[in-house]
Amino acid sequence: MQLGISPEEFAARRAALMARVGPDAAVVIAAAVHHRRNRDTEYRYRQDSDFYYLTGFAEPEALLVLLPGRAEGEFVLFCRDRDRAMEIWNGYRAGPEGAVRDYGADQAFVMTEADTQMPGLLAGRQRVFAPMGTAFDSTLAGWMNAVRAQSRAGVQAPESLHAIDSALHPLRLIKSAAEIAIMQAAADLSAEGHRRAMAVAKPGRYEYELEAELLHSFTRHGCIAPAYGSIVGSGANACILHYTDNNAELRDGDLVLIDAGGELQYYAADITRTFPVNGRFSAEQKALYDVVLAAQLAAIAVVQVGQSWQAPHEAAVRVLCQGLLDLGLLKGELEAVIEAGDYRRFYMHRTGHWLGMDVHDVGDYRVDGQWRALAPGMVLTVEPGLYIAPDDDTVEARWRGIGIRIEDDVLVTETGPLVLTAKAPKTIAEIEALVGSA
């Protein structure tokens, strides 16, 4: 099966969005800005997720306009003009002709025409939907004001500006078969990266050496970059949730926590695994790991159609709290510990997030004040953990500095949860057989 989103699927996405905003509306989304890294070099360009979701167009300096019911064409794309000299330096440009031929635009203009064309395109539209809170806000406001300036000539200006999120993001939340296929491939290659990192790990190596194994696996399978900054935290560094220095030496007796995933064709994977540097869990490490794994399995089991978004978190918290009570790290009765939130000094984050084109993907977690019900096609992470701070003198020294998280990507299906990242080992037996085997 060839991976990719077809032109027909991009067109269906645009049609679905236009149906949601209505015939009197306009949708305006700007391409991502190409940011400078330092002096005369730039970061690798990555298109805005909303823009790409609707167009498949990956170039900067572009503008998407959707105009439901417009006789001259509903899909208008502004982009850079063809420029042979610039293409020699920086690569091929589609140009307006390519925007129509290759991306299905009904009309296309060069980006330099936007200021003259946009007021006319917005005229007669009652509402405008766009991303809000970006540098593009002032540009869009200028175009809307230009339309208002023509009101005495009988030109109808848009009456209101709306955030695109509530109209577009529910569409992105439910993944199509093509999207799921890409996400499965991203999960598989990311799992390979985790296996490689486990295999080369041993005392005396450095965190960045394991990161290099991850990057090798990601890029050799077509990922242009990781989906997010890779976390490789050994020892007490595993207790820092967003640790990214990745420069410490791996020490005998420590655990190492790796939270990393590749991005394939704009879709992210997100996997966390924790394993012993020397290939053998200590008694304390094993005891805590067993609790976290049990919590994760309990959470995955309730990723079912109709269950609330909150259900996996509640399932994980209950197992984590009981485990902490059994080990003596918490005192009291289970229900009282959960109610008081005593566990939060060891488990301070939630159990997951939506996953898709963004690693923390779009979509509301509550709808009308209630936790959203899970539905087929949603993909979420399930990632409980325990983190015993190295300076926590309320627990015995043998527990301190142990950080553990286990994370998988889970698809909601009619027949139950499907773990996309199942190829990444997570049982103690699998891990101990793999670590240091290279």
Image (cartoon, rainbow, N blue to C red):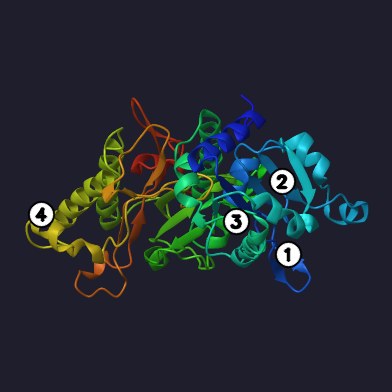
Residue drawn 81% across and 44% down? 96
Q: Nearer the viewer, residue 163 or 175?
A: 163
Give the image location of residue 383, x and y in percent: 36, 50
Q: Earlier in the sequence, mark 1 or mark 4?
A: 1
Identify the amino acid type marked 2.
Leu
Q: Is residue 47 visible?
A: no
Q: Is residue 307 left or right of residue 116?
A: left
- Image marks 2 and 4: residues in contact by CB distance under 8 Å: no
Task: Please give the residue where the numbered disc 4 appears in the rendered image.
Answer: 334
Q: What amino acid type should be assigned to the residue bearing mark 1?
A: Glu
Q: Position of residue 11 (x, y in %)?
A: 62, 33
Which residue is the site of mark 1?
42
| Tags 4 and 3 touching, CB below 8 Å | no
Residue at the extreme left of the image, as rendered: 333
What amino acid type should be assigned to the residue bearing mark 3?
Answer: Ala
Please state which of residues 63 and 326 is positioned toward the viewer in this rendering: 63
Q: Tell me the CA gap for discs 2 and 4.
A: 58 Å
Q: Disc 2 on helix, strand or loop?
A: strand
Q: Earlier in the sequence, mark 1 or mark 3?
A: 1
Q: Between label 2 and label 3, give the one nearer the viewer.
A: 3
How would you rate the neighbour count of disc 3 (Cα within 10 Å): few for under 14, some for 14-19, many for 20 or more? many
To which residue does mark 2 refer?
77
Say what secondary structure mark 4 lies in.
helix
Return the residue at label 3: 157
**Residue at horizontal 43 percent and vertical 33 percent from the top:** 377
Eyeballing the image, is 432 above or below 239? above
